Image (cartoon, grey):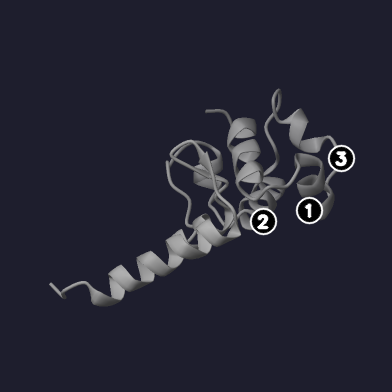
Amino acid sequence: MTLFERIKLLAEQKRISLRTVAIELGLGENYLYSLKNKKPNADNLEKIADYFNTTTDYLLGRESITDEDLETKIDHAVMFGGKPLDDSDRKMFKELLHTYLNNKPQK
């Protein structure tokens, strides 16, 4: 997966456009699209990583996971098993996980 594809995926998970991300970061409207063909400077890469609560290593493909908390991932999930999720589905997932973790036997 390319840098651009990772950024696009993160934006989709947050349900925001790449244009919106670029504007909120103070970058040009089409800056993120330009990353299909060029590499960002270190400052912009760090801005993008901070915006998505991940690492520059993740964006560059050096690690496969983000540092985002599972609860945050659930908040931004749009599908599970190919089926769309609405707010009540996401709330139920979080409640189920909290119940499970709170009642799980200690090791």
Residue flagged by tag 1: what amino acid is it?
Leu
Query: Which residue is label 1 attached to?
Result: 25
The percent coordinates of residue 68 (x first, y second) are: 50, 58
- Above or below, 42 against 40 in this view is below
- Answer yes or no: is residue 72 visible: no
Residue 107 shown left or right of residue 87 in the figure: left
Q: Earlier in the sequence, mark 2 or mark 1?
A: 1
Q: Tag 2's secondary structure?
A: helix
Q: Tag 1's secondary structure?
A: loop
- Residue visible at 50% across and 45% down? 57
- Residue visible at 42% across and 41% down? 64
- Answer yes or no: is residue 2 visible: yes
The percent coordinates of residue 94 (x first, y second) are: 45, 65
Residue 10 shown left or right of residue 16 in the figure: left
Query: Which residue is label 2 attached to?
Result: 51
- Residue 29 tag number: 3
| Label 2–label 1 contact, CB within 8 A | yes
- Alpha carbon separation for disc pair 2 and 1: 8 Å
- Residue visible at 21% across and 72% down? 104
Q: Quadrant of residue 101?
A: bottom left
Residue 68 shown left or right of residue 23 in the figure: left
User: In this orientation, which residue lies closer to the viewer: 41 or 52?
Assistant: 52
Residue at far top of view? 37
- Alpha carbon separation for disc pair 3 and 2: 16 Å
Residue flagged by tag 3: what amino acid is it?
Glu
User: In this orientation, which residue lies closer to the viewer: 62 or 101?
Assistant: 101
The percent coordinates of residue 69 (x first, y second) are: 47, 62
Q: Tag 3's secondary structure?
A: loop
